[in-house]
Amino acid sequence: MVEYFRSIYEGIKIALQSIWSNKLRAALTTFGIVIGILSVTTMATVIDGLNRGFESSLDMLGKDVVYVQKWPWSFGPHYKWWEYINRPEMKLDYVKKIQDLSRYATAVSASDGTRENVYRKDKTVNNVNIDGTTVSYTKTSNININSGRFFTNEENRSGRMVCIVGSAIAENLFQFGHPLGKEIKFGGQKYKIIGVLAKQGKFLGLMSMDDRIIIPINTYKKFYGIRHGLQIQVKYPNKPALAAGQYELEGIMRRIRKQDPAEKDNFAVNKLDMFRQQYDSMTKAIYLVGFFLTALALFVGGIGVMNIMFVSVKERTREIGIRKAVGAKYYQILIQFLIEAIVVCSIGGAIGILFSMAASAVINQYFVAYLDWKTVIWAFLICAMTGIAFGFLPAYKAAKSDPISSLRYE
C-alpha cells in the first residue's frame, strides 16, 4: 500500500515538473478543459440559483393554495387560447359563494392588478404594481406586515383611500422618516399609508415582490374597474385537504356558473404543481443543452490532452526505458502518466472554476446564480474522469513499451 502511495506522490511530482517545463503547451492543452468546466459549473450555478429562487418564490405565492382564473397555467403548442379567450371573467361575488359552499377551504380572497407611477412630493417610483385585494388576502398569500396593519372589512366596504406599501416603495419614497400615516399619490388619487410589508425579495430572481402597493379591492374597483384579470385564491389547511378541495372547488364553480354536466369547464383551477411541472421541463431542457455543450468542450479538450500525452510519452521514451531498466513496474509507469493527464485536466478544471466564480458573481447582479461546494467537487471528478479516459492510451503505451528499444531511442 505504501508503495502505491509513493508511486502516486512521485507521479504527481513528475507531472508538475513536466507541466512547468512546458507551460505554454500545457496552457493550450487545458483550454478545452477550462471551457468545458466553465460551461458545466456556470450552468450548474444558474440551475442551483433558479432552484433556490423557485422554492422561495413558491413560498411567496403561498403553499396549499389554488387559483381560480379564466386562463390555465400552461404553455406550448397545445395551448388552446382561442377557447380560453371566450370564457367569462371571474366575478368578485364568487369569493363569498366559494367560502360559503366549501367544506375544506380555510380562506378565500380575490385580487386584480395594474401598474402606475407613484409620487410623493418630488420623488417618483415608476411602473409599480398596484394590487387590489380583499381582507383575507393576508391568509391566502405569504405576506407579512413589518409595521402598521392591513386594511379592515369596513375600509374595504367603503372603498377607503388607504394602502399597504412594499419595502422597496417605503425605502425609495421615505429615505428619512417613517411612511406610516403619510400620503402618496398614484392614478390621480391620494392614499394614506397604513402598513409596510416585510421584505420578500424577487420572484424567480426577476420580478421584485417588494415593489408593489396593496389597496382594498373596492377602492381598486372604483377607480380601475374589474373587467378582466381577476383571480380568486383558495387556501387549504394541508395537502390532503387541497387534493380533496380541488375537486370540490371545480364542482362549486360549475354550480356558481350554472354549467350543464356535458359542458366543459369555462374556468381554470391552477395549482403550484402545474407551475412546478413547467419549471421542471424548462430546467431539463437547460440541462440537456448544457450537458451537450459541456461534453463537446470536454471531448475537444480530452483529445488535446491525449495528443499532448502521446507527445510527452514520445519525448520521454529514453526516461521510460531507464526507469524500467532499474526496476520500475508496469503499473508504476501507467500511474505516472495517468496522474500527469489527471493533473493537466485538474489544472484546467481549477481555472474553469475560478472563471465560473467570477461569472456567477456577474450573473447574480442581474439574475440568480449559486455556486455550491458539491458543484466544485463534481467539477474536479469530471476532470479526473476526463484525464483517465483520454490519458489511458498514452499511459498504456508508455507502460507496455520495451525497455531495450526505449533505451536505444534517440
Image (tube, grey):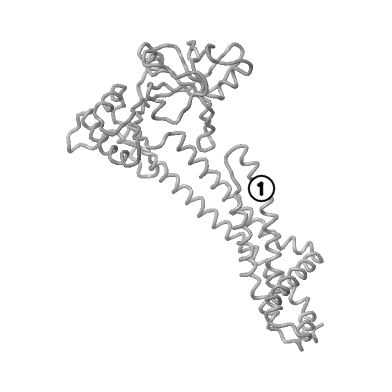
Furthest residue to the bottom? 404
**Drawn side of residue 312 relative to residue 258, left or right:** right
Q: Residue at x 39, y 16 (%)?
A: 152
Decide: is 95 above or below 294.
above
Residue 310: x, y in percent? 71, 74
Decide: is 228 above or below 342.
above
Q: Which residue is mark 1?
A: 357
Q: Residue at x 67, y 66 (%)?
A: 342
User: Depth check: 316 or 103 in front?
Assistant: 103
Secondary-structure class at tag 1: helix
The quarter of the picture where residue 309 lies is bottom right
The quarter of the picture where residue 299 lies is bottom right
* Residue type at tag 1: Met
Residue 111: x, y in percent? 39, 25
Residue 410: x, y in percent? 82, 82
Residue 20: x, y in percent? 80, 64
